[in-house]
Image (cartoon, grey):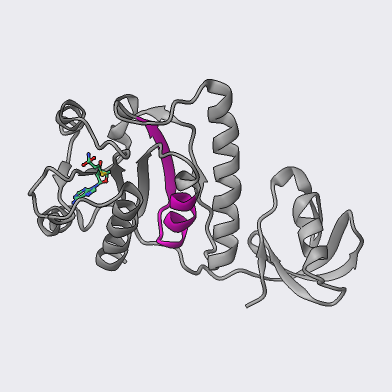
Amino acid sequence: MSKRFIVDSKNIKKVDNNISIFGDEAHHINVLRYRVKDKVYINEYEVEITEMDKEYVSGVIVGSLEEKGVPNTNITLVQAYLKSDKMEHVTQKAVELGAKEILPVMSKNCVVKLDEKDKTKKVDRLNKIAKEAVEQCGRTDEVEVLDVENLLKVDYSKFDAVLICHEASTNSLKEAINNIKNFNSIAVIVGPEGGLDEKEVEELLRNKNAYVVSLGERVLRAETASFSILSILWYELG
Ligand code: SAH
């Protein structure tokens, strides 16, 4: 399959079957040495390049993208903010493992403290990483990193179910998955390096269809916990 480039609407001009793009992705197509007559995917279109230079790429639409790699269940990874480059790593892997959204949250035991300016900058950076991961893994949908919220202030009512990963729990993940198998949207909560606070877990359990679950007897690092739960859900829910 030709490579896919995801271009912001502000950098696209489309008139009938002709499409032109500007900005980062036009540059990216140049860097990858595509030439006139090559085919690429631009968002949902298959495009044959007819003209290009450093600043822009133009082409004609010759087809459309068939859906590929799009998960059946919308999984939102609610990830407590982790230190150093771990959030970036988790974001990249979550995209590959089928999360539909990533919602970074601040919780009681978060080691990282962010002010409003940091938050905006970090989320922009994480969205860039998510976009690259979408392109790299060949998913035909998009994955959004949402603005940082407080763990307990999130509106969980928009999800059909909430899975809370907690190392102190002995509840079976299998049973929880059996109960939520046919749901469309699931929030998966993974705590920070210092873990979720018992009071936070208690509060989160007040949401409808909320389950606190164990990923086994071993205490996993937060990022390992995220990769595991997403892989398990991907396997179980398709
Ligand atoms: N508080 C712990 C470690 C927290 S691990 C300590 O310092 O000993 C970070 C996060 O990973 C947890 O909040 C939880 O969401 C998840 N996690 C790690 N191991 C887990 C397990 N065995 N079962 C469920 N969740 C786990």
Quadrant of the image containing the N terminus: bottom right
Residue found at x 85% / y 60%:
57
Quarter of the figure with residue 45 = bottom right
Residue 113 at x, y percent in the picture: 44, 26
Does the magenta run of residues contain 93? Answer: yes
Position of 195 compared to 130: left or right? left
Quarter of the figure with residue 193 = top left
Residue 125 at x, y percent in the picture: 59, 42
Position of 157 compared to 48: left or right? left
Q: In the image shown, does 163 or 105 lie closer to the viewer?
A: 105
Position of 150 compared to 52: left or right? left
Residue 28 at x, y percent in the picture: 76, 60
Residue 117 at x, y percent in the picture: 58, 23
Residue found at x 42% / y 37%:
104
Q: In the image shown, does 5 or 220 lie closer to the viewer?
A: 220
- Magenta-tinted stretch: 89-106
Position of 129 compared to 201: left or right? right
Residue 72 vertical position relative to residue 143 in the rendered view, above or below: below
